[in-house]
Image: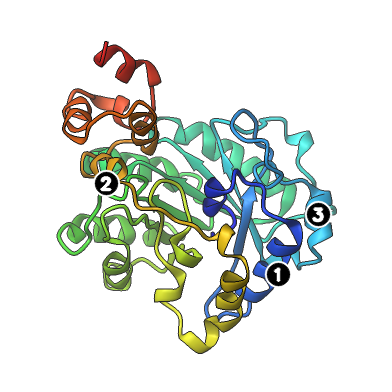
Amino acid sequence: MTLRDGGHQVEFDWPVSFAAQYSSAALQLPHMDFVEIGYWKQTGKFDGKFYSVDEALVHSMNIDSGRLAVMIDFHYCSKDLGQYPSQNQTSFGLIRLTSRRESVKNALDFLADLKERTASQTSINIFNVSNYTHGEILNTLDAIENRPPDFVYLADTHGAIDLTQDGERFAEYAEKVTSFGSMPGFHLHNHLGYALSNYQALHQLGFRVADASLNGLGKGTGNLQLEQIVSVDAALPLLDLWAENPELFKMERRPHGLIAARLSAADHYADQAEDMAVPSADFFAFLQTLVGAQRDNFDPSLMREYFL
């Protein structure tokens, strides 16, 4: 997911030739099933061509689309099925739909329609799971069981989960997903440095697939680093691309992002705090005032009002 989640670092405006080179090299790695190239049919956030990938862009990359994946954010995507190519046109090997827990039933209906139209494999990604109770996650999985996609991912969106300390309940989730015939997966962020140890714990907990990106490129302070989990000799072509394009692989660790992760809050609050030059202690105090969905759903007015 270097190109998709890492797209946040370059406004989703990758050079097409680089994206094609990267995809081709990454697909040669052992155990690499898909390369996720970007978002699909999105509006409202970014203008970069990999935020709303179109069929012409895929053709120009000259990559087998059956090995490519795309992400759809249910809250920002087109709901017009006629805008999506049918299975007789350009199709992706995997369509991943991400949704908040409260919208998962509608998202599943949409995903089932997409699967029928495209014949692609499908995944539902439930994000912000660090802020959901055990019962809320189980109820969400109950809803998914009625219309199971090929994959069910839990996303540690805020990089706040430590599976070495909190693995038992996640093993229960993986077992439930497996029981209704889907493949359990985990989307790992690395805000607090847990991504690698979490990855190493996944198999024992029953998860079968995970995401990674070169140099941990991703939203906020990044993701599981691909180069840490594959052999050096297998990664050499990707490392060459990194060396040749250092400006595309910048991944900063930011103090406000670490504070936000500790309190399981959206990265956008950290961005806003940096723009407003809010001292760390004051930012920490502000985050403690957030309740419920405010932690996950960024509201810029909250911080402005707090510091008036």
Write down the quadrant of residue 3 in the picture. bottom right
Residues at marks 1 and 3 touching, judged by CB atoms closer than 8 Å: no
Given residues 120 and 240, the one toward you in this image is 240
Q: Earlier in the sequence, mark 1 or mark 2?
A: 1
245 vs 116: above or below: below
Q: How far from the left and from the top, in percent, is residue 217?
A: 48, 57
Q: Mark 2 points at which residue?
A: 258
Q: What element carries label 2?
A: helix
**Percent position (x, y) of residue 131?**
26, 38
* Helix, strand or loop for disc 3: loop
Circle 1 crowding by C-alpha within 10 Å: few under 14, some 14–19, many from 20: some
Q: Is residue 205 left or right of residue 208?
A: left
Measure the alpha-carbon separation of dots 3 and 2.
Answer: 40 Å
Q: Residue 136: percent from the left, percent from the top?
A: 28, 37
Residue under circle 3?
A: 90
Which one is in front in this view, the residue at disc 1 or the one at disc 3? 1
Left or right position of 138 against 64: left
**Quarter location, residue 143:** top left
Residue furthest bottom as drawn: 233
Quadrant for residue 270, please give it. top left
Q: Any mark on residue 21, and which?
A: 1
Foreground pick, 133 / 144: 133
Type of amino acid under label 3 = Thr
